Image: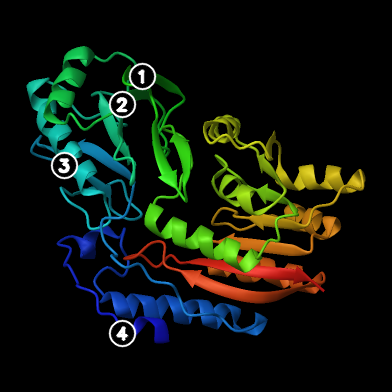
Amino acid sequence: MKTNETKTYPQIKCPVVDICGGCQIQHLPYETQISQKETQVINLLKDFGKVSPLIPMDDPYYYRNKIHATFQSDRRGKIISGIYQAGTHNVVPVDSCLLHDQRADKIIVSIREMLRSFKMRPYDEDTKRGLLRHVLIRTGFKSNQIMVVLVLGSQVFPSRKNFVKALIKKHPEINTVVMNVNTKKTSMVLGEREQVLYGRGFIEDTLCDQVFRISPKSFYQVNPVQTEVLYNKALELADFSGDETIIDAYCGIGTIGLIASKHVKKVIGVELNKDAFKDAINNAKRNNIDNVFFHNDDAGDFMLKMADKKQGVDAVIMDPPRSGSSPAFLSSLVTMKPAKVVYISCNPVTLKRDLDVLVNKGYQVEEMVPVDMFPGTHHVETICLLTKK
């Protein structure tokens, strides 16, 4: 905690922190949040070596660039918008959240106020009546571009041209509006069908000097400020010489692989999701990068194929989902025997499980650095550097 003792952070009170459940530790001073997360990571990972002090966020508020609001009618018929209470389908009315980009919250309030004048009702999953289910807003931290996704329970959108025109008049800062249709009874926000109503259907933002295209379904880290901290620290630990061939597993739209491309000879990005794979290719072209090669495949299967062909790489960068890596992927990784592994984890519990496997298969943990990507919540990111014994 030595790095954090010299700075004090202002604490802003959230009026719904006790009933929302989205911010499990928002009520605590930020110094206490940092201490708790650091202690959690140390307790879980101390058997692998020393854990470095957690890297906090300079301003731990209003950092999310992806905002999702749900719309419902309350018992009196009044339209409310906000966040699902944790573990329920009850909507907690929220006009301003301490995690959200404040521009996005203002747009959501405007949309809610517009529903009455356009005689639109929120969609009801049980009766299948109404129209608007959710609003998803994505914002560019450096570009200031804004995307609004209207998630509807029907493909019929009466007066949509007038609605979009009125919305743009209220908020000329909006760059694009997309209609998404989701008619299923599901916890998934977005459906399969989309139609661009205004603008290009995507926005762009800059991360670590690279420009990335962000579409409604793209995975893109929700805290761009700390993502730069996270990726720069990961590359610092990797300490590439410039002559390596590396694999970016679970590469998504190619963010960390493209950012790493100027530090290595060749990057092989592997992504199973077809939409993300296409975005990754577009992002490489957008940034004029020609030493990154993307493959639409399961990362574990892809590495096994490389191993069968006696093809090797010098390092693997992996950033798996919260559930951690699969046994099949870890087995493929061990078979391939890269000299370095940079494991970026958003869940220290599954990280510990996966590190146990890798250490038992001949790797040793060199450094572990936690980073606070999600202030106000109990989530914590951790970067681990492993080397082959």
Residue 112 higher or lower than 231, as above or below = above
Tell me if 343 is positioned left or right of 224 in this view. right
| Residue position marked by numbered label 2 in the rendering | 176
CB under 8 Å between discs 4 and 1:
no
Residue 145 higher or lower than 153, as above or below = below
Q: Earlier in the sequence, mark 4 or mark 1?
A: 4
CB under 8 Å between discs 1 and 2:
yes
Q: Residue 36 appears at what percent x and percent y?
A: 40, 79
| Residue position marked by numbered label 3 in the rendering | 106
| Residue 372 in view | yes
Q: Earlier in the sequence, mark 3 or mark 2?
A: 3
| Residue position marked by numbered label 4 in the rendering | 6
Q: Earlier in the sequence, mark 3 or mark 1?
A: 3
Residue type at tag 2: Thr
Q: Quadrant of residue 153?
A: top left
Give the position of the N terminus as an image quadrant. bottom left
Q: Residue 28 appears at what percent x and percent y?
A: 26, 75
